Image (tube, rainbow, N blue to C red):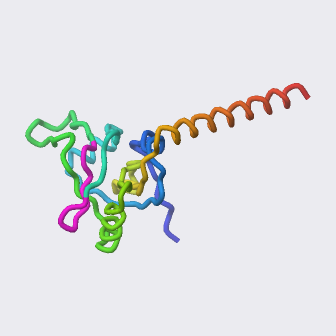
Amino acid sequence: MPEKLPIQDIAVNRRARHDYFIEETLEAGIVLTGSEIKSLRAGRANLRGSYVRIENGEAWLIDTHISPYEQSGTYFNHEPTRPRKLLLHRKEIERLRGKQAIKGLTIVPLRLYIKGRRAKIELGVARGKKLYDKREAVAERDARRQIERALREHRKRY
């Protein structure tokens, strides 16, 4: 039986889970150049503000910042925020296009990671949260934290 490939997280978009309700997730590959993959392996990426656009039957990752690789020369380096093609099956792209056409839904990257030897990205089909939803989530998190703190104090006494 083949060994389980290690997964190494590079960038996580925590803001996406704060700003959106994630309805569905899927994994996609990314087309990268040599200096981009080296920079990713060094952990130099940022997903903040990035999104996915579907054009001409292809999925593109827009505004993801992958820092230039310092050891490669200026000629061989890459543009940090260039659009990057995502590797998905045709049926997946069509399904995402249908979801994106629904009012209020968008496709955001949730995390960027290396699985085995390949760079992958986890995408989420998301619906934007209203301000009161965000406040509700913060209140729930605070309440949970207070309950856990009270339970710890109670266990400590007895």
The image shows a total of numbered marks equal to: 0
Residue at image point 37% right, 50% down: 109
Residue 148 in the image: state x and y as whole percent: 73, 34
**Residue 95 in the figure: left or right of residue 63:** right
Of 32 and 56, nearer the camera is 56
- From the top left corner, tell me how far across and down residue 39 is, in percent: 28, 41
Q: In which quarter of the image is the C terminus?
A: top right
Residue 87 painted magenta: no
User: At 21% from the left edge and 42% from the top edge, which residue is drawn?
Assistant: 81
Residue at image location 50% in from the left, 61% down from the top: 4
Instruction: Give the farthest residue toward the bottom.
Output: 91
In reply to whether residue 60 is colored magenta, the answer given is: yes
Judged by its main secondary structure, the magenta piece is strand
Q: What stretch is highlighted in magenta?
A: 54-64
* Residue located 32% across and 37% down the image: 44
Establish if 61 lies above or below 148.
Answer: below
- Where residue 10 appears, x then y in whole percent? 39, 43
- Between 72 and 92, the residue placed more toward the observer is 92
26 sits to left or right of 59 = right
